Amino acid sequence: MLRTVFLASTVVLSGASAVAAQGFYAISNKADGNTVVAFAKNETGQYEMLGEYATGGNGTGDLEIPALQKDPTHPLANGDDPLISANAIALDADRGLVLAVNPGDATVSLLKKNDDDTLALIGTAPTSDKFPVSLALHGDMAVVASVGNDNGSGSISAFRIGDAAIEPVEGSRRDLKARPSTIAFSSDGAHVIVNELVTGKINVFAAQDGSLSEAPVSSVGSPRDDDTRFQAIPVGFAVAGDTVLMSEARFLTPEFGLRSEADVVVQSPLYSWQTSSVSSYKIDGAGGISLVSGDVLTGDAIEGGEIANCWVAVSEDGNTLWAANALSSSISSFRVRENGTVALINARAFKDQSEELFFSDIALSAAGDEIYQLIGNTGEVMILDIEPDGKLTAKQTIGGLPELGAYGLAAF
């Protein structure tokens, strides 16, 4: 049943000027009332908190889905990556609308973006299953990916988006073979792309008359070149034209287990990981998806490079990709050619040498001159300048989010 709350949200303003400015939104994941937190650049060029706005739904706090059990020694249960997804919040700048998932009560929120970048809740709607993790918006159609009861399930469904309402599309639920990580539209809006976390499958559905094709029109598996290479775990991805740029963490062994090795990874003290990677794909007009560049490393070899690449951001021209390596506290840069091939530029375009910071969601600023990097285990966002040589320089780190549990970034 649709629940609608017109312009009813809690707003806490800080000292930021109430005029439109460059900034970003992130989601707090508060279990007792989820919120979107806004940050904006002030007249001095520094970012500050603009306000916090209720979504009308609930988060999961510092507990990771679907188990909702805390284990500080386990890299998938310690609270710094609650959803293992990207695109948990989306912005339609032309219409002034923001969409956000609420994993705690299985809802999606529609908010109005005001001229001063503050937000007001329009309404919420139930998702297709428990634990929604990712969404995408194209015109008056939205799609949401949900995990369900366990890692072996998952589904996606469609919604109609109006200026004053969000409504589920009846009969649009489509079940997956495993939990999804990220969902997105193709550039022309004709297709919907969704990946499966553990199977490594990437599925393409047709977006038809406001709903989805009954089955994928195409699917492809993530690349793994030899028997010693760890499984590809696709999380976040970006779409640039007809190219899909996919992150790949490599933490599961060929047998789908964790490699026990103590004190190698600062943030994962009981286990070690192989070098992460990026793969690229082309989507044709019929929705067919095919591999272009497979398993392009965030380093020089499958061991010893940057690890846990789970989020990516692409430049406005589509020529540069930045990949956030969560457990290496680093960002790698890649060159993307017109034919979709990808090549590593710099495995450490930026790196925090402590390797203690969990680099999660990443986004390009609206002006295309800065990178926003969410730090999942401190409740902060790092702002980095993009230098002419492609390297990144950290210029500010701003707090205001819960220490653990925050997710999602959307630039305005």
Image: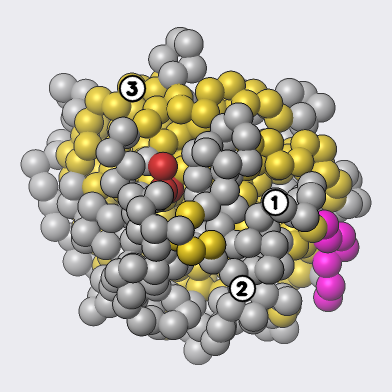
* Residue marked by disc 2: 179
Disc number placed over residue 393 in the picture, else none: 3
Taking the magenta stretch, the answer to whether it contains residue 217 is yes
For the residue marked with disc 1, what is the amino acid? Arg
Label 1: how many residues lie within 10 Å, few (<14), some (14-19) or many (20+)?
some
Q: Is residue 187 visible?
A: no
Disc number placed over residue 229 in the picture, else none: 1
Task: State the residue in front, 63 or 231.
Answer: 231
Distance of label 3 from label 1 (alpha carbons) = 33 Å
Disc 3 secondary structure class = strand
Q: Are marks 2 and 3 in contact (CB under 8 Å)?
A: no
Q: Which residues are magenta?
A: 214-220
- At 76% from the left and 29% from the top, the residue drawn is 341
112 to the left or right of 199: left
Give x and y (percent) for residue 65. Answer: 44, 76
Asked if 338 appears above or below 279 in the picture, the reply is above
Q: Residue furthest left?
A: 15
Asked if 275 appears above or below 108 in the picture, the reply is above
Q: Earlier in the sequence, mark 3 or mark 1?
A: 1
Identify the image quadrant of residue 101. bottom left
Task: State the residue in front, 1 or 288.
Answer: 288
Q: Which dot, 3 or 1, sits closer to the camera?
A: 1
- At 67% from the left and 75% from the top, the residue drawn is 178
Q: Earlier in the sequence, mark 1 or mark 2?
A: 2
Disc 2 secondary structure class = loop
- At 69% from the left and 62% from the top, the residue drawn is 254
Distance of label 2 from label 3 (alpha carbons) = 35 Å
Give x and y (percent) for residue 356. Answer: 29, 46
Task: State the residue in front, 205 or 399.
Answer: 399
For the residue marked with disc 3, what is the amino acid? Thr
